Image (cartoon, rainbow, N blue to C red):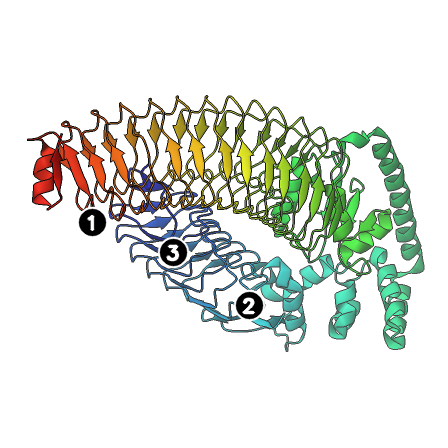
Amino acid sequence: MRAFVIENGVLKKYCGPDGDVVVPEGVTSIGKEAFWRCESLKSITLPNSLTSIGDFAFYRCNSITSITLPEGVTSIGNYAFYGCESLTDITLPEGVTSIGDRAFAWCESLTSITLPDSVTRIGEEAFWRCESLTSITLPDSVTRIGNRAFDGCKSLTVKCVRWQPYYTETFKGRTAVIISKEDLITDIPVNLRRRALLGFISEEIGDPESERSKSYLNYAKKNAGKLCSFAFDNPKLLYYLCENKLIKSGDVDAYIEEAEKRGNVEEKAMILNYQNSLGMENVFKARDKKEKKKEEYEDAFIERMMKRDPSQGIAGMTFVVSGALKHWESRKDIKEHLEKHGAKLGPSVTKKTDYLVTNDTNSGSEKNRKAADLGVEIITEDKFNNMVGKWHKDAENVEIPGWFNEIPAEAFEGCEKLKEVIIPDGVTSIGNGAFQGCTSLTSITIPEGVTSIGNGAFQGCTSLTSITIPEGISSIGDRAFNCCTSLTSITIPKGISSISDRAFEDCKSLTNITIPDGVTSIGNYAFKGCKNLANINLPDGVTTIGWQAFYGCESLTNITIPDSVTSIGAYAFWGCKSLTSITLPEGVTSIGWGAFEDCKSLTSITLPDGVTSIGDRAFNGCESLTNITIPDGVTSIGHYAFKECKNLTSITLPDSVMSIGDVAFWGCESLTSITLPEGVTSIGGFAFYGCESLTIHAPAGSYAEEYAQENNIPFAAE
């Protein structure tokens, strides 16, 4: 397999081993997802020909610590380095103009970064949750900073060299410089206009008829209802609203209520006087109008609820979200999740709103007041999360709603506190990575209706000791139970046709597993690193044993390989140190690279007649192997094939053998006799190095005799 898949200069996919990688010259772009989740990638050298980094290019490359981008790079795609949690340093060249959405989100170890003067755009949530980031310098060239670009950067101070400060907002220990005095309020980001209004009313106001002054007055008048709580926090604004008669009749009750809650006698008196100035008739009319709206909403809500099918869950519901949230990454994520299940995210509270979601249920915000006026139920984010089936990192005990028919991909990924999950009977599938990294989850029951378990579904559930898999499951994805280090036993149900790649890799406590009839293949790395797995029976019908399938299963003493097997992959039984003997079926035609390497207790093995080649390192380090019969039909002995087989005393190669690889019998110190056929025409370097007692037996005048003479090895003519 090629390490790099490159098309027209774009590196589409990297397929080689992780570690230290050098991308070849000529590559102009790292394509989308090229190094997706290469979690062991430690370093990468990029070519000078490179001009762009694509979306998700190095997504969750958890081990990479630093990277230097070549001078020709001009853009960094969305999510390009998302979740590179070990990344402490990155050098951006002068040509970079754009940093995509979430490009460096969740790079928890990144401490500082300098953006070149060429950068004009920083995407949404570009540095989201870079919790170690202490400083970043924004150059003069920046014209757009996306929403929440530095949200969750707990240690960050933003240094802005573009704007001269007119008003400085401090939040969560960070300082962000905003605007200049010449700007209209409409030029200011929406989320900062309230603060800018405070700055405006604190000025010595110049021309009240200027365009700028009018923009602030119009904003205050239009948004007076929304400013209630904020105005009481900032009395100058409260006086400004009253002085300019900007509070409408319909909003005055909220101001009275807020004044009573605050207990400030002077402010309450001022608001009551303001109410009188409006005329009580106008106030009463506004109250009647609100009551009518509330009744209409309640009638419409009841009608909607009666029409809904409970099995459809939240389908048809409309939610409005207000204020800061604890768990959701963005409003966009909420919108996508709701739409996926047939619900909607509304922009504002109306008579069609079902629920208002806010973590500040007692806030005097305009949305809260509107919800209270209409009778819309206000719920917390936690209640909302359970209602809509979206769980977050601090979840501990979860009962999945009965209307769910699937556990979505990555639904509980990284929920390290999760201890218990109740899955309803209606669920039919568990998505990719659904419980990945749930390190506190100890057991789980999967209901009978589930038919598939996705890739990496339980990967890294290090406390999971038991799991029941129902009979109806027909598919278990790659890495499904990878690194479940506490899992001791598992029964695979009937109906499964293959043990997928890395399905039980590094399940170090696994001692027993039952594989049912019907399974036809054991995937690559399927049981790699299961060092306590003592024995396993493969059913009739299995045809292939994949690469490194039982690699490092050092307690494996016995395995039955059925007659149906035709292929044993490279390093399939590498390091199975307790394996003493094995019988290969007649259908096997090749012994893969390192297939039995370092099987130190293996004393004998029978190779079937159909074998035509013995791969490189096939029996390397099998130091207990005393004899082996090579069948007719084998044409080559691979490099290092029997290296360090210290107890091998004699061996006869059949007439079909034509070549012996490098270091093939190196260190076989007990080998006294080897019979080579006349057809051998190639013997690799150091093939018999360290075989001090060896005599080569071969026909007189053969290549073997010539080789023996050249290498000072005793020769006996046959």
Q: Amino acid at mark 3?
A: Thr
Looking at the image, tell me whether mark 3 or mark 1 is earlier in sequence order: 3
Q: Amino acid at mark 2?
A: Ile
Per the image, the residue denoted by label 1 is 692
Whether residues under marks 3 and 1 lie with C-beta atoms below 8 angstroms apart, the answer is no
Foreground of the two, 674 or 191:
674
- Discs 3/1, front: 1
Residue 384 location (% of width, % of height): 75, 47
Q: Tag 3: Cα neighbours inside 10 Å, few (<14), some, or many (≥20)? A: many
State how far apart marks 2 and 3 are (Cα): 22 Å
Looking at the image, tell me whether mark 2 or mark 3 is earlier in sequence order: 3
Quadrant location of the N terminus in the rendered image: top left
Left or right, residue 711 beside residue 613: left
Residue 178 is marked as: 2
Per the image, the residue denoted by label 3 is 97
Q: Tag 1: Cα neighbours inside 10 Å, few (<14), some, or many (≥20)? A: some
Q: In the structure shown, which secondary structural element does the residue marked by tag 3 occupy?
A: loop
Q: In the structure shown, which secondary structural element does the residue marked by tag 1 occupy?
A: loop
Residue at 65 percent across and 41 percent down: it is: 337
- Discs 2/3, front: 3
Whether residues under marks 2 and 1 lie with C-beta atoms below 8 angstroms apart, the answer is no
State how far apart marks 2 and 1 are (Cα): 82 Å
Foreground of the two, 697 or 110:
697
Query: Can you see residue 271?
Result: no
Residue 239 against residue 308 in the figure, above or below: below
Residue 392 against residue 425 in the figure, above or below: below
Residue 66 against residue 513 in the figure, above or below: below
Residue at 67 percent across and 40 percent down: it is: 467
Foreground of the two, 591 or 314:
591
